[in-house]
């Protein structure tokens, strides 16, 4: 138990959709926050969306209205639905979990990463 396991991702055309999944072996409720981050080569890792124990969700401005985070506690999974994808969404995406912060400020566990590539 411990590290998160991701699935999904891949390559799509502009305007397409993808869904990322993250399996949480310890169970979703073990953590105060579950989140998705992404990293573009040469840039800092950035937050994309988070969800806390009370299902309060945050989405960063650059994905608001296009991406949606959700969770299924019964399956010990959470998801990132990505719609209307743009080339600038191309990045390595990571799921993360934080036991101490409801805002995913200190994620201690990470998924292995999955590449999302959006062709123009």
Image (cartoon, rainbow, N blue to C red):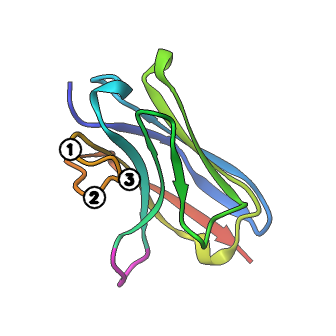
Earlier-in-chain disc, 2 versus 1: 1
Disc 2 to disc 1, C-alpha distance: 8 Å
Q: Is residue 48 left or right of residue 120?
A: left
Classify 10 Å Cα crowding around label 2: few (below 14), some (14-19), many (20 and above).
Answer: some
Q: Which mark is residue 100?
A: 1
Verify CB contact (< 8 Å) between mark 2 and mark 1.
yes
Q: How many marks?
A: 3
Residue placed most toward the observer, 80 or 9: 80
Residue at the location (64% across, 59% down)? 11
Q: Main secondary structure of the magenta part?
A: loop
Pair 1/3: label in front: 1
- Circle 3 sits on which residue? 113
Task: In the rendered view, tell whether residue 1 sits above or below residue 78.
Answer: above
Q: Position of residue 29 (x, y in %)?
A: 35, 25
In what quadrant of the picture does the N terminus appear?
Answer: top left
Task: In the rendered view, tell whether residue 10 sits above or below residue 78.
Answer: below
- Circle 2 sits on which residue? 105
Disc 2 to disc 3, C-alpha distance: 18 Å
Magenta run includes residue 105: no
| SS state under label 2 | loop
Magenta run includes residue 42: yes
Q: Which residues are magenta?
A: 40-44
């Amino acid at each position: 138990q411990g590290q998160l396991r991701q699935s999904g991702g891949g390559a799509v055309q502009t305007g397409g959709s993808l869904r990322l999944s993250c399996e949480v072996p310890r169970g979703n409720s073990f953590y105060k926050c579950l989140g998705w981050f992404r990293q573009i080569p040469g840039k800092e890792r950035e937050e994309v969306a988070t969800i806390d124990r009370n299902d309060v969700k945050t989405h960063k401005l650059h994905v608001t209205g296009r991406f949606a985070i959700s969770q299924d506690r019964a399956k010990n999974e959470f998801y990132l639905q990505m719609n209307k994808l743009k080339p600038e969404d191309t990045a390595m995406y990571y799921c993360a979990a934080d036991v101490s912060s409801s805002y995913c400020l200190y994620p201690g566990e990470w998924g292995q990463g999955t590449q999302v590539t959006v062709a123009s």
